Amino acid sequence: MLQFKLVLLGDSSVGKSSIVHRFVKDSFDEFRESTIGAAFLSQTIKLEKHPDVTIKFEIWDTAGQERYKSLAPMYYRNANAALIVYDVTQPGSLVKAQSWVEELKNKVGDQDLVICLAGNKVDLCDEDATAREVEREDAQLYAKEQGLLFYEASAKTGAGVSAIFQEIGEKVYQKKGMEVPSSAQARKPLNVELQRPSTNDSTSCCS
Amino acid sequence: MDAADSPGSSDNSRKLDSELSCPVCAQTVHDLARLNEHLDRIHGFGDVSHADASRTSKQASMSQNTVEKSFRPTKGNAFELKRDHWIKPIWGKSRCRTCSKKLNQAREAINCRRCGEVFCKNHCDLIIKLNVNAEYDPLQGEWCKCCTSCFRNRAGYNEFGVAFDKTSVFVELRGSRIEDEQLRKLQLENRFIRLANGIRQISNQASKSMLASIRKYTDINKFERSVIPWTPDEAAFACSLCSKPFTLALRKHHCRLCGKVVCDESQTNCSNQVPIMSLIRAASDLPISTDFLETNVEDVQIRVCSACVRTLFKKRKFMKEISLPEPSILRIYDGMRNTANVILSILPKVLSQAEEISSAPNGPEIALLTRMRRKLLDSFSVYDRLTKQMLKIKPKNSAEERIQKAIVARASTLIQENMLPLRSLTSTAGTKNSSHETTPESERSTNQGYGNNLSIREVKEYRNQLMVLKEQKFLVENMVASASKQRKFDEAEILNENLRELNEQSEMIARALGEEGFR
């Protein structure tokens, strides 16, 4: 069994926790409270294209609120995959998602990291077509430019959620699982920055 | 239709009944019941199966719009509103005047009884009183449906309802009550003066002759009854204040000031034996001669009820209390407040000055800053001293203790909040000072303690990060506990690893914060 660390990033209240809960527990809570800090969940799946491969996702569901921003580096630092979520009815959340993509590319380097961009809450657009503020094509174009996986999903109806994780699993497996099939090594990524970049500032040293 | 059934229809309506004619086919009918029946059967109003008296007036009002001059029943009275001003709706074309909703059938539409315009059901849901000519008549009119604009256009309408100015009535009532109380107080005061003087006289006589001294208490008793006639014991069954019935255990007593029968239970405190001297001292402003020998009346006690005591002494007690010097807690608190004001007014000035200097250092300005900073530090030390003084005072009761605690808590937060920017200031000022050699030695030595060159914003940011990390640590610890409880040891291991990372991180930040960290 391969173990992969996956981190969820995105603006607050775009539905990160809802997506994870749909994936892990197949449930949806209309009135979910906002996440504090970062929550941990795990789920094991079988890859559709390689039925003999099981992948266990260790999912860190981070809080989107600005206050907890400083926690995120700890979780994406040695993650194998990042799922960046935005809300298709909130254009601001896509901007935030793009800034997360930038941060990940600067701080981690994308050779080990599989990044997936996911637009959530498409069920709102099915009810009312005018609710959509972010066109699928725009987001898809951006994802293509940046070399990200792209999906639209709805945690409420469950549409597209499992496809996201299947695809991520597939991609991570291609990148890492093929090279080092042993589970022990799969958990240890290669180039890892052990120090937080910000703490290397001269300001933080003792004088 | 209940109009016809009700027995209380007036003569007037009965007269109207005899001349009734069907509004549709003009056929003459003799009374309301017949007309109802006629309308139901011939013209098909309402539900045929319920064509009798069970039909409600609501159904009737729904159907009446179809005919311009249909009969409209009102409660207990035959009230016929003018209808020729009603606009006849064209189904499918007419629209509600308010919401422009298309009106397709009679069930959806209603005429405003006053202006006659057509509305949908939702926009004609208010009622006002109108007379038969559809004019406003708040006194003799009947309740009729109307639209919002007609409701608002009526005379005397305002947004908040009806307003009456009752101030004069209130002032009058209150004035008379205060007057009553004043009178009552005066009466009691006079009675008390007479009582005190009389008792003094009797006591004086008692001190002169043997006979009088034996009779002293009977004399006093007799005299007390002459000042105010006592309510006879037989007339009283319960205490006049607490209404408890008298028993063998609960004895009857008379108040010497009002003469009423009261109990003397300690719980309700309805009446008490009070030494007359203490009463005289409490009411020292009354013209009672105090030249007599106190020993004579010292042992004399009179019974007074709590109501009389309140009337006589409440205001006096209050006046006495406010003339007393204020407690030391409040005195110190005043001092603290003044110092705090000084600190809060100087601090922003000092900070802005320091910022200016750090961008463009210049001799006289630095001297000014140093002076202001010294003043600020002095204020802080004064404040601190006052706080310590406050802590030394022993509270007299629990309320005072609470106040004291609150003041001290406030003081410590104030010092914490305002000392922090000052610290960073000392470091900037300190570096500048050393280069310009303008400050005395003592000032520089105070700067040594705060070695970290962190700006206020950085400190804040680090503190926030540390807080978030600690929160997360707590969360993860809980997660570890629940994971091992559910025997998911692989998860617990991952979480433990995260916990280690969190610890590392928070240590790093704590080190960066150094002195500014949480203690």
Image: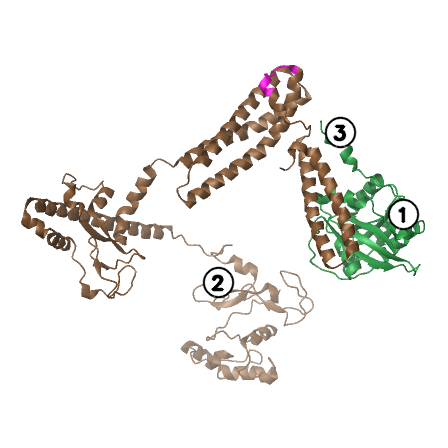
Chain colours: A green, B brown
Tell me which amino acid carries mark 1.
Lys
> Which residue appears at 65% of the width and 33% of the height?
B516
Are the residues tagged 2 and 3 within 8 Å (C-beta)?
Answer: no
Q: Chain of mark 3?
A: A
Q: Quadrant of residue A33?
A: bottom right
Distance of mark 2 from mark 1, alpha carbons?
73 Å
> Which residue appears at 24% of the width and 49% of the height?
B185
Q: Which mark is residue B65?
A: none
Pointer 3 residue: A202
Instruction: Give the mark, 3 or 1, whose residue is nearer the N terminus.
Output: 1
Are the residues tagged 3 and 1 within 8 Å (C-beta)?
Answer: no
Tell me which amino acid carries mark 3.
Ser
In-front residue for pair A15/B461: B461
Mark 2 or 1, closer to the camera: 1
Distance of mark 3 from mark 1, alpha carbons?
38 Å
* Neighbour tally class for label 1: few under 14, some 14-19, many 20 plus, Cα within 10 Å: few
Task: Measuring from the top left, give residue B213's x and y in whole percent.
Answer: 9, 49
* Neighbour tally class for label 2: few under 14, some 14-19, many 20 plus, Cα within 10 Å: many
Q: Which mark is residue A144?
A: 1
Pointer 2 residue: B136
Whether residue B67 is visible to the viewer of this picture, yes or no, is: no
- Horizontally, residue B175 falls left or right of residue B413, namely left
Mark 3 or 1, closer to the camera: 3
* Neighbour tally class for label 3: few under 14, some 14-19, many 20 plus, Cα within 10 Å: few
Task: Say if the magenta span includes residue B441.
Answer: yes
In the image, the segment drawn in magenta is: B436-443
> Which residue appears at 48% of the width and 84% of the height?
B30
Q: Is residue A182 above or below residue A51?
A: above
In-front residue for pair B517/B416: B517
Q: Label 1's element? A: helix
